[in-house]
Amino acid sequence: MPTARAAALVLLFTALASHAGAAPVPSEAGVPPPAPLDPRGLPGPLLIVGGGTLPADARRAFVDVAGKDRAKIVVIPTASADVDDPKKVSSFLTPWEELKPASVVALHTRDAQKANDPAFVKPLTEATAVWFSGGDQNKLTAAYRGTLVEKELHRLHARGGIIGGTSAGAAVMTDLMIAGGTDTARLGDGFGFLPGFVVDQHFVARKREKRLEGVIASHPTRVGLGLDEGTAVLVRGRVARVIGDSTVTVCIAKGAGRAAAADEYKAGSLLDLVQLQRAALNRAAKEPFPPVKPPTPDVKTGALVIVGGGGAGANIWKKFIELAGGPDSTLVVVTTAMEDPLAPESVEEVALKRNGAKHVVALHTRDRKEADDPKFSDVLTKAKGVWFSGGRQWRFVDAYEGTLTEKRFREVLGRGGVIGGSSAGASIQSEFMPRGHPLGNTVMAAEGYERGFGFLPGCAVDQHFFARKRTADMTGLMKRYPQYLGIGIDEGTALVVRGSVAEVIGRTKVAFYDTKKATDGDKDYEEVTVGEKYDLKERKKIK
């Protein structure tokens, strides 16, 4: 692994995941670094509302997710001063009772000792949903933080129950909580159902932009969510959907050559929370990605077979097998880019066997802990070839980046083996990984998911290139990151790389984008066709 890339990975993954050898992330103003979101998403759903009138579709969504007519809802109105009047308790329950769940009960105390009483907490053990009413978030944390109530709330969430809240009930969702203040926030500790984020509410209505942006500027590893009144986000897994009449503002601190961001999203918009957190962590890193000067494209040992998707022909499969040492070599197919549920046998496994390979093993997990288990990737210690499947390249990143398994991928190449892949399995091989956004493949530079595995340093590889008319996409990417050599590989076509020499095999052609060169007519790239070679270091066709 190149030194700069190794250092950057450690900086990123000290916050993204715990693994051997990682240095701690420095605290921000005495606040510990955020716990990472599991790429597989939160264990249970969240409904976070910015205050004001609760949108009817948000209320219905909460009950539906909780089990509809089987929902058992616990309302915690402790943030409100009104709840201390027994006559007013029913007002917190009635709106939920009107939707006819199985049960709605109130849970309230201001006595931390009572909050540790198993009899008091019992309704939470049977609940499918918990709702925090609005008021003063400090009343919630004063009563329940560090108690059996808080533990049981996390158990409920871990078993898939939904937790929701409005206004004060929204603020307590995160680990770092805005506890008060006008333009300058006063901070406290929330319940941490959504770690790594900071929620502010009544956002536009009470002009709280400066407050949240200030928190994120002083805590740049966090992501800010500013929810306006009558607006909510429903989080399921790692994806948040905006519901309601106004907007949700996502705030990320400046860094990685980018200005601070405050982007508004309207109803129907989707947010990938893992992508947002990765973007913030990268911006906060001492050496954010991408580097101003990437390493020279040079595969010092072993070889790469990079296929543009659309089905590899027999000559490509046979070349891969040949570079791996022949049909008797152990070949590993990494199928993780594909969507669950996976087929019993991937098309790549079938193709390798059909073309003569005798020992083909599939490797797949979505669990980073498993990817760090030596037993999981033991087959890589014997393998002479690794093939990355098609699908979505961000799934490879989520499962393997910074783990022992990724290290062992590199070791296959380091001892003279071959790494190949098609479509997603092509882009993951480059240092800069185009089209990595988890919510769609149209974003060429998906912040937080721009870094590939870098088997081919100094390059950005796109696929399905001419078949899907992607030339302009690479032009835009090269304007943004001119330090890279852009490579667009067409379908049924492969780039075989040894050292700094890339040979085109297969069906059609490959485009090379070098921003240092003058354009040739209406083309800002150089075409290299089947049978021709290109010098990646010198950035020119080999005559």
Image: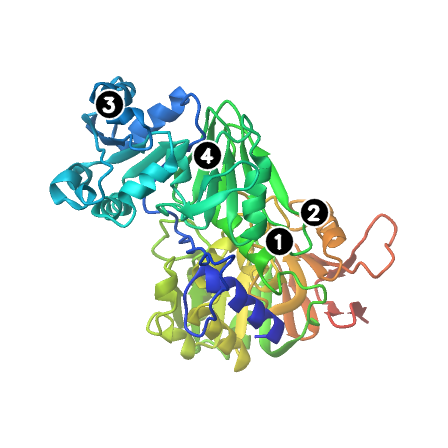
Side of 366 where 480 appears, left or right: right
Residue furthest to the left: 119
Closer to viewer: mark 3 or mark 4:
3
What is the C-alpha distance between the residues marked 1 and 4? 25 Å
Say if mark 1 contacts mark 2, CB within 8 Å.
yes
Q: Are marks 2 and 4 in contact (CB under 8 Å)?
A: no
Q: Quadrant of residue 505?
A: bottom right
Name the N-terminal-most of marks 3 and 4.
3
Residue at disc 2, secondary structure: helix
Figure check: 480 above or below 334: above
Distance of mark 2 from mark 4, alpha carbons? 27 Å
Q: Residue at x 48, y 67 (%)?
A: 402
**N-term-proximal mark, 2 vs 4:** 4
SS assignment at label 3 = loop
| Residue identifier under label 2 | 473
For residue 249, which quarter of the picture? top right
Q: CA distance from mark 3 to mark 1?
A: 58 Å
Q: Which amino acid is tagged 1?
A: Pro
Say if residue 530 shows up in the picture.
Answer: yes
Mark 1 / mark 2, whichever is N-terminal: 1
Give the residue at x 47% y 60%: 15
Question: What residue did someone put label 3 on?
Answer: 85
- Bin the neighbour count of mark 3 within 10 Å (Cα to Cα): few under 14, some 14-19, many 20 and up: few
**What numbered label is drawn on residue 241?**
4
Q: Which residue is mark 1?
A: 434
Q: Amino acid at mark 3?
A: Asp
Residues at discs 3 and 4 in contact (Cβ within 8 Å): no
Position of the C terminus, as image quadrant, is bottom right
Q: Nearer the viewer, residue 382 or 86?
A: 86
Q: Earlier in the sequence, mark 3 or mark 1?
A: 3
Calculate the distance from the C-alpha at mark 3 to the C-alpha at mark 2.
Answer: 62 Å
